[in-house]
């Protein structure tokens, strides 16, 4: 019997020569680990050269995939949107410009760009907004008589996924989606210790009055513990931060999601405009909250902002397991195909994609794009079918490059180190409570490309034991040569 605790060891010979039945017996021994007697594994390992199945276990059982669902969302995004797709955000004026004054409103129309943040701008969260303010000044506008209006009508206003747990709502990984979004729809909190007994210093980015902070974090002795909790009251932007941080410890960076992404977006943007010396008589508003809608027939496009190309977005989704980006992608599919970005519209096209490649969509349940919901159900065989289809496409390299690399990058950066699987396995991890998954591609000892899907549900042991089993299987594959 091979136990999960052994999985980090690469004590195998350089290569293990075996027949397929012998190899299958080895994997049966691994997956029969007694730590998972009450759990259920769904596994499929398939040759990409000839379609042969090297190993299957419960391949038709419905399981929660966790973030392995992102492999389907990103596959559908490449299929429908294409590698050259970029999100756009349009800036319009309504009203005449007389001299340096706009005698009307400034409208920012969003189409779901998830990347208006510091992610591509050396962590400068407001870089895009500063660029837009500079563009206004270059267009000769330094006074606005009207309002700063956020037009988010390309997407619906349902920010959270179906079945998301209520106690996730504060956390960055459950930030709401939206047609207009800033900084992953989160604020960042940097907590720096002082002397023991003193209140720790707190910095917030972006600095905004849109949120109200109730702050009670104190510095404690170096031999004590750091324990900080962050909680946003449901349906509000009142955020409570409390706890302790050890004296002389490094600053701790935390995140909290916000409520109403559009209002957050335009509120912060207005402050940036004011900081650039642009005078504004009106207020920042979500277009849905206006008593009287602006006359969009009189709008004039001033300029358009574009995101990075789709392959860069896919890498953030899959390498970083970024739920917010995944949900934005799903709604973008819905918008581009049906002119309205909703989860249901996006999922309808994801299911059409799956059906077209041979997946029985009557035996699958998808409710979001990220896998955060525990209501998602699919089989290992269905996910394996997606991986096999993508391998044959001319855009496969973009898909493959979006995945984490064992021992090198993303969520696999600290796994399978100093083994033949290091810098070989390209995969996507997944985790929610009692669920752990790993799926992707790799080369065997014969330099044969294989896809693999490994999903385990309903375990109660530490998830690291599941990681160890998955890692050991990958290491066996990396050392496997056919007799």
Image (tube, rainbow, N blue to C red):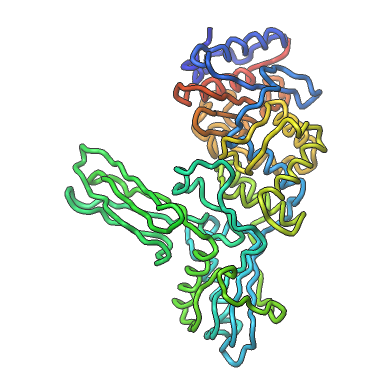
Q: Is residue 303 above or below residue 331?
A: below
Percent across and percent down for residue 330 are 67, 49
Q: Residue furthest bottom?
A: 99
Q: Residue at x 61, y 17 (%)?
A: 476
Residue 298 located left or right of residue 280: right
Percent across and percent down for residue 416 are 53, 26
Residue 223 located left or right of residue 352: left
Residue 275 lies in what quarter of the image? bottom left
Location of the C terminus by quadrant is top right
Q: Residue at x 40, y 62 (%)?
A: 211
Q: Is residue 356 above or below residue 49?
A: below
Residue 295 lies in what quarter of the image? bottom right
Q: Residue at x 62, y 52 (%)?
A: 328
Q: Is residue 217 above or below residue 302?
A: above
Percent across and percent down for residue 43 are 65, 22
Q: Residue at x 77, y 32 (%)?
A: 359
Q: Residue furthest left?
A: 197
Asked whether 322 or 156 is in front, the reply is: 156
Q: How many marks?
A: 0
């Amino acid at each position: 019997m091979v136990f999960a605790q052994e999985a980090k060891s690469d004590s195998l010979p350089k290569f293990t020569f075996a027949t397929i039945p012998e190899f299958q017996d080895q994997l049966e021994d691994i997956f029969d680990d007694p730590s998972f007697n009450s759990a259920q594994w769904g596994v499929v390992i398939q040759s990409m050269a000839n379609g042969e199945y090297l190993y299957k276990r419960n391949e038709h059982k419905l399981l929660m995939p966790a973030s392995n669902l992102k492999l389907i969302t990103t596959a559908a995004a490449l299929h429908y949107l294409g590698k050259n797709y970029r999100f756009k955000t349009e800036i319009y004026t309504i009203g005449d410009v007389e001299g340096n004054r706009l005698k009307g409103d400034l409208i920012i129309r969003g189409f779901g760009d998830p990347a208006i943040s510091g992610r591509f701008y050396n962590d400068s969260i407001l870089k895009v907004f500063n660029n837009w303010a500079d563009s206004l000044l270059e267009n000769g506008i330094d006074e606005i008589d009207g309002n700063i209006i956020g037009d988010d009508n390309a997407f619906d206003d349902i920010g959270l996924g179906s079945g998301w747990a209520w106690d996730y709502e504060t956390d960055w990984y459950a930030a709401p989606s939206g047609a207009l979004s800033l900084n992953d729809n989160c604020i960042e909190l940097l907590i720096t210790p002082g002397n023991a007994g003193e209140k720790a210093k707190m910095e917030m980015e972006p600095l905004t009055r849109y949120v109200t902070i109730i702050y009670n974090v104190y510095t404690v002795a170096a031999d004590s513990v750091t324990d900080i909790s962050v909680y946003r009251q449901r349906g509000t932007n009142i955020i409570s931060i409390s706890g302790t941080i050890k004296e002389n410890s490094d600053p701790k960076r935390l995140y909290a999601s916000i409520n109403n992404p559009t209002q957050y977006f335009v509120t912060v943007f207005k402050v940036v405009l004011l900081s650039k010396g642009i005078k504004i008589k009106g207020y920042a508003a979500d277009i849905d909250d206006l008593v009287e809608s602006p006359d969009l027939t009189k709008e004039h496009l001033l300029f358009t902002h574009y995101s990075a190309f789709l392959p860069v977005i896919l890498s953030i989704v899959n390498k970083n397991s970024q739920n917010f980006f995944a949900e934005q992608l799903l709604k973008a599919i819905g918008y581009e195909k049906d002119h309205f970005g909703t989860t249901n519209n996006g999922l309808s096209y994801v299911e059409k994609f799956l059906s077209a490649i041979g997946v029985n969509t009557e035996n699958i349940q998808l409710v979001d794009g990220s896998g955060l919901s525990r209501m998602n159900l699919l089989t290992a065989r269905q996910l394996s079918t997606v991986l096999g289809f993508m391998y044959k496409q001319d855009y496969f390299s973009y898909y493959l490059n979006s995945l984490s690399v064992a021992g090198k990058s993303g969520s696999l950066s600290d796994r399978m180190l100093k083994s033949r699987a290091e810098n070989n396995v390209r995969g996507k991890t997944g985790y929610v409570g009692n669920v752990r998954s790993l799926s992707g591609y790799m080369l065997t000892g014969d330099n044969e490309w294989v896809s693999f899907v490994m999903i385990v549900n309903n375990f109660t042991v530490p998830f690291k034991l599941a990681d160890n089993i998955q890692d050991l299987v990958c290491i066996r594959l990396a050392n496997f040569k056919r007799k």
